[in-house]
Image (cartoon, grey):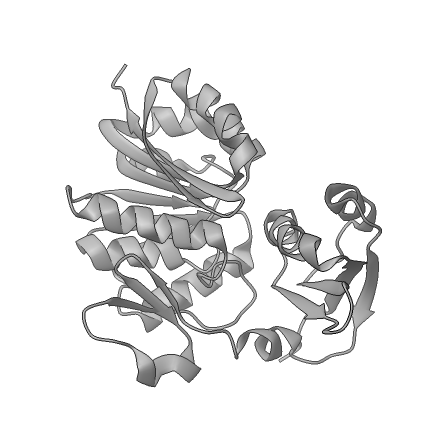
């Protein structure tokens, strides 16, 4: 099988900045396949590296993180799997997200989701993904959802989690066809392939979404900019008593995103935070 070329964007900076730069690179387009941090144990220095399946815009990323990034083409080695195969499992709410190397460590009383290292975003290790899983777990204590949309699904982790929680149909969409294929494979590996319908779509622009609407739960772990633009179309596709979980946004972007959704009649139900990142749970006002 011919593998696509892999690109690396790297930047050197102080250790205190490394975590925020990692988070920005993980969510900025095009989404990287992995982000690594190499720290000097004796100096206040770290190198952040992001791996991409397509050449990233170095000027844009440099402006985003506030430091000059170096972009280079890597030799033909499976860097993604090498970088992710040692990641620890993630416990978020009722969910336990793990890879093949953790299969023997799954505890009792959890909802296991197996996600392998691959060419898509969403292994559960990013704060926003874990926050969405926590929000799903909390919602499930009070209500069952019957028609769920995972918008910008990446690996399909959230869609799989929703399918396992409620055993009901879930639609998973992503603009990237590689992510869609991976989401289908992951749904099959987790025994929910009949429930998860993954398709390639740009936002809400797909005829199938119109046919499947109204949704009673929409998950959107993307970026603040797309979230604001999608507010009217998400509102139009949501049932009168529907709920949305929005993430991929920093704390300082909460009010910005909220203003767009409040204008559509949504009410804030809950905010989950981890470090610099947030997830919002909103309820449709039925207006």
Residue 123 sits above or below residue 220 on the image: below
Residue closest to the eye, 146 or 193: 146
Q: Position of residue 192 (x, y in %)?
A: 27, 64
Residue 51 lies left or right of residue 242; in this view the side is: right
Task: Write down the quadrant of residue 178 in the picture.
Answer: bottom right
Side of 19 relative to 160 (left or right): right
* Image quarter of the C terminus: top left
Q: Identify whether 224 is placed above or below 32.
A: above
Out of 259 and 287, give the one closest to the viewer: 259
Looking at this view, name the residue that lies furthest to the front: 42
| Tag count | 0
Image quadrant assignment for residue 270: top left
On the image, the x and y values in percent for residue 210 come to 35, 33
Q: Would residue 146 appear left or right of 86 to someone viewing this image?
A: left
Residue at position x 46%, y 49% in the image: 128
Q: Is residue 197 visible?
A: no
Asked if residue 37 shows in the view, the reply is yes
**Residue 134, percent across and down?**
32, 51
Residue 106 horizontal/vertical position (percent): 29, 77
């Amino acid at each position: 099988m011919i593998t696509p070329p892999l690109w690396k964007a790297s930047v050197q900076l102080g250790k205190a900045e490394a975590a925020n730069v990692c988070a920005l690179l993980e969510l900025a387009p095009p989404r990287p396949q992995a982000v690594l941090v190499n720290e000097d144990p004796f100096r206040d220095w770290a190198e952040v590296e992001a791996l991409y399946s397509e050449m990233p815009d170095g000027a844009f990323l440099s402006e985003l993180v506030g430091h000059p990034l170096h972009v280079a083409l890597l030799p033909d080695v499976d860097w993604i799997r090498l970088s992710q195969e040692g990641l620890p499992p993630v416990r978020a709410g009722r969910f336990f997200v793990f890879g093949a190397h953790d299969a023997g460590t799954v505890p009792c009383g959890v909802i296991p989701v197996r996600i392998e290292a691959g060419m898509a975003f969403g292994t559960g290790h990013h704060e926003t993904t874990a926050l969405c899983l926590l929000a799903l777990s909390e919602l499930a204590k009070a209500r069952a959802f019957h028609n769920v949309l995972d918008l910008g699904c990446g690996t399909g982790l959230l869609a799989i989690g929703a399918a396992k929680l409620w055993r009901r149909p879930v639609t998973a969409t992503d603009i990237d066809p590689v992510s869609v294929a991976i989401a289908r494979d992951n749904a099959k590996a987790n025994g929910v392939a009949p429930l998860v319908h993954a398709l390639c779509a740009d936002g809400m622009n797909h005829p199938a979404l119109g046919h499947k609407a109204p949704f009673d739960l929409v998950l959107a772990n993307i970026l603040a900019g797309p979230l604001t633009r999608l507010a009217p179309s998400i509102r139009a596709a949501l049932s009168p008593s529907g709920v949305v979980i929005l993430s991929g946004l920093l704390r300082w972007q909460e009010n910005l995103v909220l203003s767009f959704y409040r204008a559509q009649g949504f009410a804030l139900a809950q905010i989950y935070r981890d470090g610099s990142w947030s997830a919002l749970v909103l309820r449709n006002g039925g207006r």
